Structures are given as C-alpha cells and as structure tokens.
Image: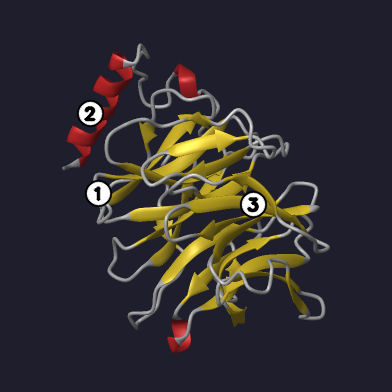
Amino acid sequence: MNRKLIILFLLLASALYGLSPSSPMGEELKGGGKGRIVFSSDRSGAWRIWMMQADGSEQHPLTKDETDANDVDPCFHPDGNSILFSSTRGGKIGVWRMSVDGSDLERICDGDQAEWSPDGQRIVFRRQGAIRIRDLSNQEEKIVTPKDWTDCSGGAWSPDSQYIAFARLRENRNELYYVPTIGGEPVKIYDQKGACEPHWSPNGNLLVYETETHICMIQPDGKKNRLITYYGGIQRYGRWSPDGKHLVYCQGMSEQGPWELYLIPATGGTPVPLTEGGSDMNPDWK
C-alpha cells in the first residue's frame, strides 16, 4: 500500500474514533516539529543512519559504507553532539559512536541496542541476551539482569539514572521490567503478549512501549496502561519528544514493511507522516 493510501486510512480511522483530521503539523502537533530526529533507513540500499528536522525536512544520511554492512538503532547523546548506533561493520555486530555530523566513527564494543546514560558517561546495551552497563571512562562492564536471563532486550535509562527498563522476550508472552542500575531484583511492570521496547518519558512518570501491533503507555507501577495508536497495520519503536508532549514512531502495513515515520501527540490523536521511500525505523528525537 502506498503512502497516500496509508494516510487516507489513518484519517478515516481518526474520523471513526471522533478525532478531527489535522493538516500537516496542525493544531494537535503544534510545536511538535521542533528539534532533530535520527533514524535508520534502507532507502539507499543497506541500512544507514539518517537525520532530519523533526518536521520531516532536511533528510540526509549520516553514515556511508561501500560494503553491505548495516547501521541501525541510533541514539542521541544527551548533549546532542554525538550518536550511538549498532552496526555490522567489520563482520560482527557492535556498538559504535560518531559525531552528530557522521564523522569520527569509533567502535565501542560487541553488542547492540545501546543507549546513553542521562549524564553521557555510561551506556546500557545488549550482548548475548543480557542487559549490561558499560562505563566509558574505564570500559568496565556489569550485567544488571539475572544471570540466567539470556532473552532480554531494549535496555533504557530512567531520567534520574536510577533504573533500567527492559523487555524479557518469552515464548508465549513478553514481559516488561525495570531494575536498579546498582543491581538488584527486577521489578515486573507488565507481562502481556508482545510488550517490548520500553522507553521512559522525560519526567520519568510513564513508559512508552510497543505491542505486536500498536504503541502503548504505562506507568512504571504497571497502572494506567493505555493504547496510543489503534490504526491498521503495525506501529513500532515509539520514542518521546524532548518535552514529552509528542511521540515519533514507525508504521508498516505488515511485518515486512515498508516502514515510515509518523508524529503523534503523546495523548493520542491523528498522526502526521514524516518520511517516504524505502523503510525508515528506529527513530530517536533530540
């Protein structure tokens, strides 16, 4: 299904649920197009890291490679001047960083799904199904998930640096947890089928996460779980705007895509499309 048909479907769904359609960056998203969004895209062939303004303008690639290596899962440093990402460069999946203009690429370690700590001094990432924290000043690492949990993913820092939220990918259901960064017993947030990719709101009061098909929000205590997207197709990789008022996420008509990025108020509403062409996923907003 092409982009025009997807947009028409979303607008019809909004009308069905009693929502008024918005013009591009309309009233629902007023102020939502501020800042920059980094994302991964295969529009040029292999997956590369791209950047754009949060209103969808000035789209351009940051990483380039003559090989078929893939770059995915970008994440802004808290100061906005550098980016973490996962890459298969060199033939093995690893965590990399680069300057915000795509220069000064450096491999940090084996692993993937990395995210900066709020002070930018550490990273949380996944290796061999375990969630780990790495201190970038001395390269020391520690595992924060239980030793026999080798099926974890999507580690994310709380804004106060005290906790890591993550998903445990089970056979019949997925489970969301948070665990103290100093170590301790994980606390279960939610355990329904498909729940994964948790990310804290800027104030730490909510987590956005994805199901097998939609974007949802939940409190860290597991209360006030609610649906944010309810459209046809599949919505994934929800991320917060810096002020916590909006979300960016990717939408596909099936598991095979193609995927495009959309903007939506954090309270729900009519989404606005940001990208078109190839598949665009893994957004982060700064």
- Secondary structure at numbered mark 3: strand
> How many discs mark residues in the rendered view?
3
Q: Which residue is mark 1?
A: 254
Q: Hey, what amino acid is under mark 1?
A: Ser
**Drawn side of residue 132 relative to residue 250, left or right:** right
Residue 55 seen from this side: no
The residue at the far bottom in this view is: 90
In the rendering, at what x and y percent does residue 99 appear? 61, 67
Q: Which residue is mark 3?
A: 177
Please tell me how crowded label 3 is: few (under 14), some (14-19), or many (20+) other residues with Cα within 10 Å. Answer: many
Question: Closer to the camera, 138 or 253?
Answer: 253
Looking at marks 1 and 3 on the same chain, the residue that comes earlier in the sequence is marked by: 3
**Drawn side of residue 28 relative to residue 259, left or right:** right
Please tell me how crowded label 2 is: few (under 14), some (14-19), or many (20+) other residues with Cα within 10 Å. Answer: some
Specify the quadrant of the image occupied by residue 34: top right
- Secondary structure at numbered mark 1: loop
Which one is in front in this view, the residue at disc 3 or the one at disc 2? 3
Residue 179 seen from this side: yes
In the rendering, at what x and y percent does residue 162 appear? 81, 52
